[in-house]
Amino acid sequence: MTATPDPKQNQWKTLDKDLNRLEILEQATAIIGRPSVAIGVSLLFIVICGVAAASFAGYGSGTVIITAAAVFGAYMALNIGANDVANNMGPAVGANALTMGGALLIAAIFETAGSLIAGGDVVSTISGGIVSPDAVADPDTFIWAMMAALIASALWLNLATWFGAPVSTTHAIVGGVMGAGIAAAGFGAVDWGKMGQIAASWVISPILGGLVAAAFLAFIKAYVNDVPDKITAARRWVPLLIGIMAGAFSAYLIAKGLKKVVDVSLNHAVLAGLAIGVVTFMVMRPVVRRQSEGMENRKRSLKKLFAVPLIASAALLSFAHGANDVANAVGPLAAIVHAVEDAGTADKVTIPLWVMLIGAFGISFGLMLFGPKLIRMVGQEITKLNPVRAYCVALSAAITVIVASAMGLPVSSTHIAVGGVFGVGFYREWHAERRARQLNLQKGKPVPAEERGRRKLVRRAHVVGIGAAWVITVPLTAGLSAVLFLVLNALFQA
């Protein structure tokens, strides 16, 4: 005898299916709506920046120009946050030491602090060091050159972020300033000595970042990971590594941050950093000892000891990035404000506080709204990271950015951080290949080509793609900026 279907049971099944469809529809709507919300918030921020700039500029002939420059400066800052900050937090997120939400929050706080506390020196390099206002006789011409550079670099960054390419924002703005300067006053308007230093730093910084990261990883593997008593080795060396990080960042913060309050020489800052590093080493020895109690003598156990230092290094790297890359957003804006308000003077470009605020908060908003995509790419898609490897990348990138920022050179944090990731990955490949070769030599067998291919730990497609993006950025933004300058100059000089 066949059982009669229960109408109520069928009714509940149908209702459950309908509710599931509604839930899926709501989730899809929320996902689709996020870009719209992000774009809306971005537009609101840009409008607020324009209104604020107009109020600070007052009522005068240059108000419209300053307002327009502030709008494009805010747009540029948003794109920097979306594209470039991934380099700071990508390793920590890829190593699962931080969630995406925690990474975004920490990066936003420290990016803003770095921009406001220590960003002035590099802003001066961008705004007046590449193309000097004195090299362009007409102040209006200089203004349109800086405006063209700002627009060109921002448009390229927006397009690159949309394609998912972690290009260098420093490359973009320097290329834009150079192209507009050449179009405005010829090749003689560009300080080629400064450009040579900047170009050299672009080559040196990724190589140095990769070598330093690989050296730290090699040290950890040799003296901690690959020794019989890993816990005892960790108790000896991990506090030293944390002390090195604390000392380096302390020296930088004292030299860059406190000089606005107290004049501190570089030598005194280094000595203070050394003292803080030693104190941190002494404090962390009992802390690491307590953390390591009861741990198994395995490599996996050691990763826990690097989680908190990794978070700290990523936060401090965000501070250094804010200090270095705020120049890319507000350097041309500062030059425009200087040219409008102090036309005809040859004084050094000064950085108004409201200009720095636009750069600082714009980078943070861009990070929060559009940053996760490239954070995942840098942290997870180039090579596999764990807390130890990510700590080496972050510490290497931090040291390199700090040195460059202290020297006033606008190096590419993208090159440094990605170079560190590549350095860690290629070192792991070399180390694995070396061990396999030793084992096969002992067995009297060569390493098969197929087996060697399987040991590739860095995705070569990313090496080629990122390298191509680095190469094309400067000429593309320079050409676009030159064209924009000619159009703006023709429109407003007519």
Image: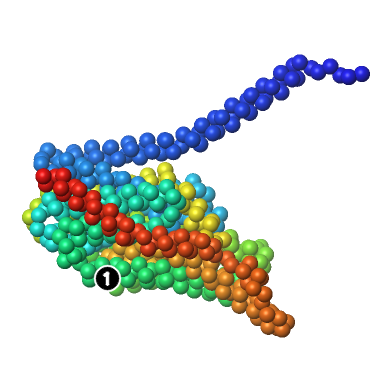
Q: Is residue 281 left or right of residue 405?
A: right
The image quadrant of residue 208 is bottom left
Residue 375 rendering spot, x and y as whole percentages? 47, 52
477 in relation to 62, above or below: below
Is 436 left or right of 161, judged from the image as shown? Answer: right
* Residue depicted at x 56% and y 74%: 430
Q: Is residue 89 visible?
A: yes
Q: Does residue 123 appear in this view?
A: no
Residue drawn where x is 52% and y is 49% of the image:
99
Q: Nearer the viewer, residue 68 or 145?
A: 145
414 to the left or right of 476: right
Q: Which residue is mark 1?
A: 196
Quadrant of residue 271 in the image? bottom left
User: What x and y, as percent, mark residue 373?
Assistant: 47, 49
Closest to the observer: 219 or 31? 31
Q: Going 61% across and 28% down the picture, which residue do you hit?
A: 21
Give the amino acid at mark 1.
Gly
Q: Looking at this view, is 196 or 12 the one in front?
A: 196
Give coordinates of residue 196: x percent, y percent: 27, 70
Element class at badge 1: helix
On the image, the x and y values in percent for residue 449 come to: 64, 73
> In which image quadrant can residue 287 be found?
bottom right
Q: Nearer the viewer, residue 197 or 216?
A: 197
Circle 1 packing at 10 Å, graded few (<14), some (14-19), many (20+), is: few
